[in-house]
Amino acid sequence: MALPQIKSKPLTFNEYLNLPDDGNRYELIDGLLYAMAPPLVNHQTLVHYISGQFDTFLQGKPCKVWESPIEVRLFPDKEGKDRHIQYPDITVVCDKNQISKDGKRIEGPPRIIIEVWSPSNEENNSSNLFEKKYWCETAGVKEYWIVYDEHRVHQYLLNDQGIYTETIYFSPNGQEAIAIPVRTFKDAVSITLGSFIFDWASGAIEDYL
């Protein structure tokens, strides 16, 4: 979840690595720095739930799913002149060779990237997610999602021309659950979302401790 752009000259990956550690995390989008905001509880609830469904589906398959903060270097360049470092909310990778030798990041386009929108900074968050979509499309990320909430998801699938086609899944009344098919895998699987994600189980906590 990104805050407004930090004013600085455009940076390369090498320059990004040499930034002083001020305790914050930054994304590098086309050379520009964006500070990462602390996530809201509902945001992380959605991220964790979706990631968990992917994790169950991917058991026994040559793919892994990670939640943020996992660093993704979309356009790795041997000389370090590339200008993109992202921390997607959810990342699915199907090539273990994309994990950098030092284990610090994913290098090259993941199979799937999912971003969860946050209302904490609506204007900046929306424009930031669509700019990320453009760069994911350019890099060749097969599938990109923007999850606006548990009732609305925009899914982008890379076609044979390298262009995203959009499908929107939503609940008309904001009450029914929605099922989003994962379209880059041969096996049929859908991620189900709904308000039930935020429900708390009933019962006395003493019964479980």
Image (tube, helix red, strand yellow):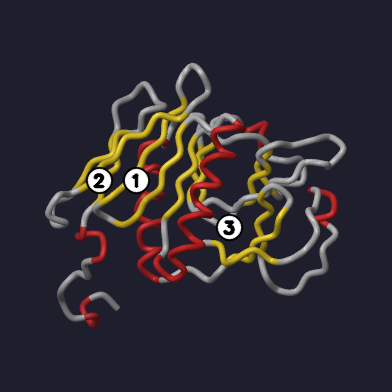
Mark nearer the N terminus (1 vs 2): 1
Residue that numbered label 3 is attached to: 69
Measured Cα–Cα span from mark 2 to mark 3: 23 Å
Secondary structure at numbered mark 1: helix
Secondary structure at numbered mark 2: strand
Residue 150's place in the image compared with 182, above or below, is below
| Corner quadrant of residue 9 | bottom right
Q: Position of residue 46 (x, y in %)?
A: 35, 58
Disc 2 residue type?
Answer: Thr
* Residue drawn where x is 62% and y is 50% of the image: 86
Evaluate if marks 1 and 2 touch, with contact meaning CB atoms under 8 Å apart: yes
Q: Nearer the viewer, residue 156 or 46?
A: 156
Measured Cα–Cα span from mark 1 to mark 2: 8 Å
Instruction: Identify the mark at residue 192; answer none if there is no mark.
Output: 2
Q: Nearer the viewer, mark 1 or mark 3?
A: 3
Q: Nearer the viewer, residue 205 or 16?
A: 16
Residue that numbered label 1 is attached to: 53
Measured Cα–Cα span from mark 1 to mark 3: 18 Å
* Residue drawn where x is 83% and y is 42% of the image: 80
Mark nearer the N terminus (1 vs 3): 1
Disc 3 residue type?
Answer: Pro
Q: Position of residue 27 (x, y in %)?
A: 65, 56
* Residue drawn where x is 50% and y is 51% of the image: 129
Q: Position of residue 145 (x, y in %)?
A: 41, 43
* Left or right of 204, for residue 86: right
